[in-house]
Image (cartoon, helix red, strand yellow):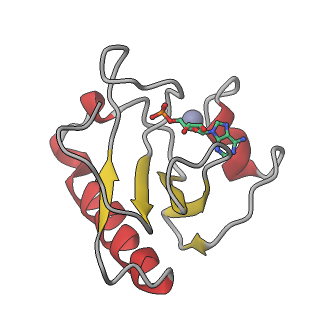
């Protein structure tokens, strides 16, 4: 728990979110500003500031988040495909400094991304 962190407050329940997914290590909830028909954020309950902070001890947690994203994608009927994005750092477009996976689907994705 990092006291000024928006997503820690969502984990704690002091800021509301519609949890479409929850397990002992992570939660998933809709992005407040969706960029696709389905746009879910998957976050660890533990505060990790960004993907750039990952160390070997985090290997299982990162794998867990990817498996959670796959389960959510199945629940959301994204069998036609989807994209997982992890914006990292200022140039990477990260605005909330608590690790999160964006799960985007329900439309065809462009490449290269913006
Ligand atoms: P990023 O820009 O990759 O750091 O992603 C942060 C995301 O958090 C953005 O897509 C925001 O729309 C989203 N966001 C910010 N506040 C909330 C909130 N209270 N509930 C859900 N999503 C949020
Ligand atoms: Zn946090």
User: Where's residue 55, x and y in %?
Assistant: 20, 37
Apparent side of residue 28 relative to residue 85 in the rendered image (left or right): right
Judge whether 69 appears above or below 101 on screen. Answer: below
Q: Quadrant of the C terminus?
A: top left
Residue at the spot 64% in from the left edge and 29% down from the top edge: 5
- State the residue in front, 105 or 57: 105
Judge whether 69 appears above or below 50 on screen. Answer: below
User: Where's residue 61, x and y in %?
Assistant: 32, 57
Judge whether 110 appears above or below 71 on screen. Answer: above
Q: In the image, ligand 1 is in what quadrant?
A: top right
Apparent side of residue 86 relative to residue 103 in the rendered image (left or right): left
- State the residue in front, 48 or 105: 105
User: Where's residue 105, x and y in %?
Assistant: 41, 65
Apparent side of residue 51 relative to residue 103 in the rendered image (left or right): left
Apparent side of residue 4 relative to residue 110 in the rendered image (left or right): right
- State the residue in front, 47 or 94: 94
Q: How many marks?
A: 0
User: Where's residue 38, x and y in %?
Assistant: 52, 64
- State the residue in front, 17 or 56: 17
Residue at the spot 42% in from the left edge and 26% down from the top edge: 94
Q: Quadrant of the N terminus?
A: top right
Judge whether 64 appears above or below 7 on screen. Answer: below
Q: Quadrant of residue 112?
A: top left
Residue at the spot 71% in from the left edge and 47% down from the top edge: 10
Q: Quadrant of residue 91?
A: top left
Residue at the spot 31% in from the left edge and 23% down from the top edge: 92
């Amino acid at each position: 728990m990092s006291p000024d962190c928006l997503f820690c407050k969502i984990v704690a329940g002091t800021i509301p979110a519609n949890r479409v997914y929850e397990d002992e290590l992570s939660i998933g909830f809709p992005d407040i500003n969706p960029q696709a028909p389905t746009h879910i954020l998957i976050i660890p309950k533990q505060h990790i500031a960004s993907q750039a902070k990952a160390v070997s001890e985090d290997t299982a947690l990162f794998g867990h988040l990817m498996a959670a994203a796959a389960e959510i994608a199945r629940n959301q009927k994204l069998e036609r495909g989807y994209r997982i994005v992890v914006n990292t750092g200022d140039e990477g477009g990260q605005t909330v400094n608590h690790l999160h996976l964006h799960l985007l689907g329900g439309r065809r994705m462009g490449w290269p991304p913006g």
